[in-house]
Amino acid sequence: MGILEGKKALITGIANERSIAYGIAKSFFNHGATLAFSCANQKLCKRVEELSTELGGGPIFECDVSKDEDIKSLKESLEKELGSLDILVHSIAFAPKDEFKAGVLETSREGFSSAMDISVYSLIALTRELLPLMKGKNGSILTLTYYGAQKVVPHYNIMGIAKAALESTVRYLAYDLGKMGIRINAISAGPIKTLAAYSITGFHLLMEHTTKVNPFRRAITINEVGEASAFLCSDMASAITGETLFVDNGYHIMGVFEREEDYHA
Ligand code: 0WD
């Protein structure tokens, strides 16, 4: 029996087969979960439709998380289709491309607001709206973060600030949700070549460096994030909440690097 047998999960944030959310969906399906999906717009929903057939062909809902009305109708549709929910996967982030290029000093008010709104507030809004479906279910919520929340990663800029807020949000929500027996955690994934990653200036250098110096000296895969996510969202992790779990081949444990060339990607 799979570790997610009998659990119903909503997966947000699949843009294509490279998306971290797709790796999570695959693992969840293999571990026995029933899946539903949400995507930001019709175009993405079409893509998800193709990918979801091999994952049980669950329902797909359009939901732009920057719109309260979309989140409300997502809840109504989920209630109609699934009745209840055990797991929410929040795999969503956005910042205007120019905000990555400019340094933090040049961050615009609009860029800051939209990065915080879509990458952080959406976790609070989705959690609050979907909570009634998760009550009494030992529910589990998961979001995705990155090392740039805790240390300076050049070019990550506004998104580093947003991810720091996201990790803090996870801790505060963990406290509030604990009373209801619901857990919430974050996975801090190492760099992976996805659509979102390509918005970051110099991502290929970051990827090359991280891959070269981590203890395993290789890149992580979306399947590895998927397997760790399956564990965190299963009852095996029943005492874990408010945590940020690194799935990065151990890059974050490094203090200095061994060789001079390790500092150059
Ligand atoms: O190296 C990486 N790729 C890492 C990503 C390392 C560590 C963490 N992450 C995080 C990202 O910051 C994000 O939170 O993982 C999460 C998933 O990102 P991803 O899988 O790397 O990227 P992608 O496949 O692009 O999925 C992110 C999706 C969007 O895709 P596009 O490319 O269309 O922006 O977030 C979704 C959308 O599907 N998204 C939204 N969904 C609903 N409403 C919205 C929105 N307003 N905006 C973006």
Image (cartoon, rainbow, N blue to C red):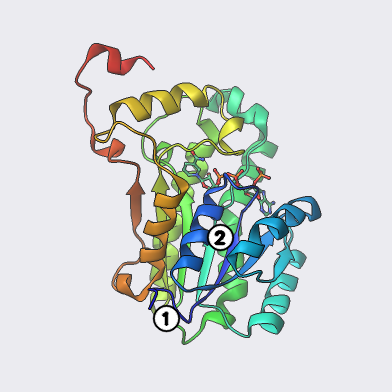
Q: In the picture shown, does residue 260 fall above or below 69? A: above
Disc tally is 2
Q: Amino acid at mark 1?
A: Asn
For mark 1, does the 10 Å Cα neighbourhood hold few (<14), some (14 to 19), or many (20 or more) residues?
Answer: some
In percent of width and height, residue 9 lies at 54, 71
What residue do we see at 21% from left, 16% from top? 259
Q: Which residue is mark 2?
A: 123
What residue do we see at 77% from left, 67% from top? 69
140 with respect to 98 (left or right): left
Q: Which residue is mark 1?
A: 138
Q: Secondary structure at mark 2?
A: helix
In percent of width and height, residue 26 lies at 51, 60
69 with respect to 19 (left or right): right
What residue do we see at 62% from left, 73% from top? 129
Q: Between 67 and 80, which is closer to the camera in this rendering?
A: 80
Mark 2 residue's CB less than 8 Å from ligand 1: no
Quadrant location, the N terminus: bottom left
Quadrant location, the C terminus: top left
208 with respect to 212 (left or right): right
Q: Quadrant of residue 174?
A: bottom left
Q: Between 180 and 75, which is closer to the camera in this rendering?
A: 75
Q: Secondary structure at mark 1?
A: loop
Q: Amino acid at mark 2?
A: Leu
